[in-house]
Image (cartoon, rainbow, N blue to C red):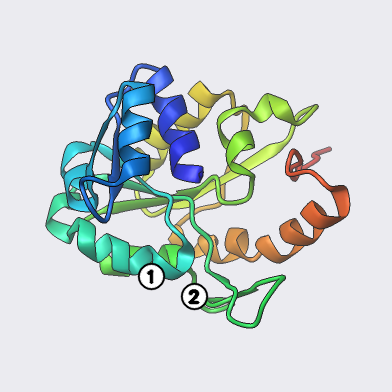
């Protein structure tokens, strides 16, 4: 759902988008490509295709999918990680499988040392990701990563979606902080009965 939402919006902005899946003939990916005017292929095909690659997989599958995509195909590129390390093994609400002294964003960066990993969008619902106007007022989005140029390129995409208050938290270790917002986000989702909400950083 996250991947389709982002891919559809990026295609609508005029980008050449390929949806990756485990098998090139994946029915959902083919249907998306036909409807959105995009392309579909394997994870490796998508990694080779994109200048900027979005990781929209389940957190529990992220590293396995990245290995299928291939580190060589991702070398020198920007990878936008929107995942969270949610652990549903003991039921719901989920806990975090990586926490405190590490993060999934950092694990992905270690897995891909030649790739510029940028963590963002993981603190909002996918519909809000591409349309922040769904939430009234000024609200905030976080971004972090080790490469300043990569963050600038990703910020431009975020601004094209309509984001205005984008807060750079620093290097990829800041993914620990944004991923740890998920437990309260999930509680709020249940309490509010809608995913159309966000955090706002209010300044003096």
For image coordinates 58% across by 23% down, the residue present is 162
Q: Determine whether 175 is above or below 9 in the image.
A: below
SS under mark 1: helix
- Tag 1 residue: 107
Question: Left or right: where does residue 179 sit relative to residue 70?
Answer: right
Q: Say whether residue 112 is visible.
A: no
**N-terminal-most mark, 1 or 2:** 2
Q: Quadrant of the C terminus?
A: top right
Query: Residue 102 — which label?
Result: 2
Relative to 101, 20 lies left or right: left
Place of residue 83 in the rendered image (x, y in percent of width and height, measured from the top left): 49, 57
Query: 75 or 57, which is in the foreground?
Result: 57
Badge 1 crowding class, 10 Å Cα cut-off, few under 14, some 14 to 19, many 20 or more, is: some
Q: Is 155 above or below relative to 109?
A: above
- Outermost residue, left direction? 72
| Left or right of 146 in this view: 198 | right
Tell which of 29 and 174 is nearer to you: 29
Contact? badges 1 and 2 (CB < 8 Å): yes
* Percent coordinates x, y for residue 17 in the rendering: 30, 30
């Amino acid at each position: 759902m996250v991947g389709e939402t982002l891919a559809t919006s990026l295609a609508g902005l005029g980008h050449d988008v390929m949806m990756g899946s485990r098998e090139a003939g994946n029915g959902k990916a083919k249907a998306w490509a036909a409807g959105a005017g995009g392309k579909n292929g394997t994870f490796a095909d998508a990694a080779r295709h994109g200048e900027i690659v979005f990781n929209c997989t389940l957190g529990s599958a992220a590293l396995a999918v990245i290995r299928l995509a291939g580190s060589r195909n991702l070398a020198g590129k920007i990878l936008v990680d929107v995942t969270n390390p949610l652990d549903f093994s003991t039921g719901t609400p989920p806990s975090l499988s990586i926490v405190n002294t590490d993060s999934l964003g950092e694990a992905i960066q270690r897995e891909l040392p030649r790739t510029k990993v940028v963590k963002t969008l993981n603190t909002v619902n996918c519909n809000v990701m591409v349309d922040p106007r769904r939430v009234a007022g000024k609200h905030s989005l976080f971004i972090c990563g080790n490469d300043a140029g990569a963050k600038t390129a990703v910020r431009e995409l975020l601004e094209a979606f309509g984001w205005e208050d984008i807060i750079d938290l620093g290097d990829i270790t800041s993914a620990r902080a944004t991923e740890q917002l998920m437990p309260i986000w999930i509680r709020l989702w249940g309490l509010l009965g809608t995913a159309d909400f966000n955090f706002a950083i209010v300044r003096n």
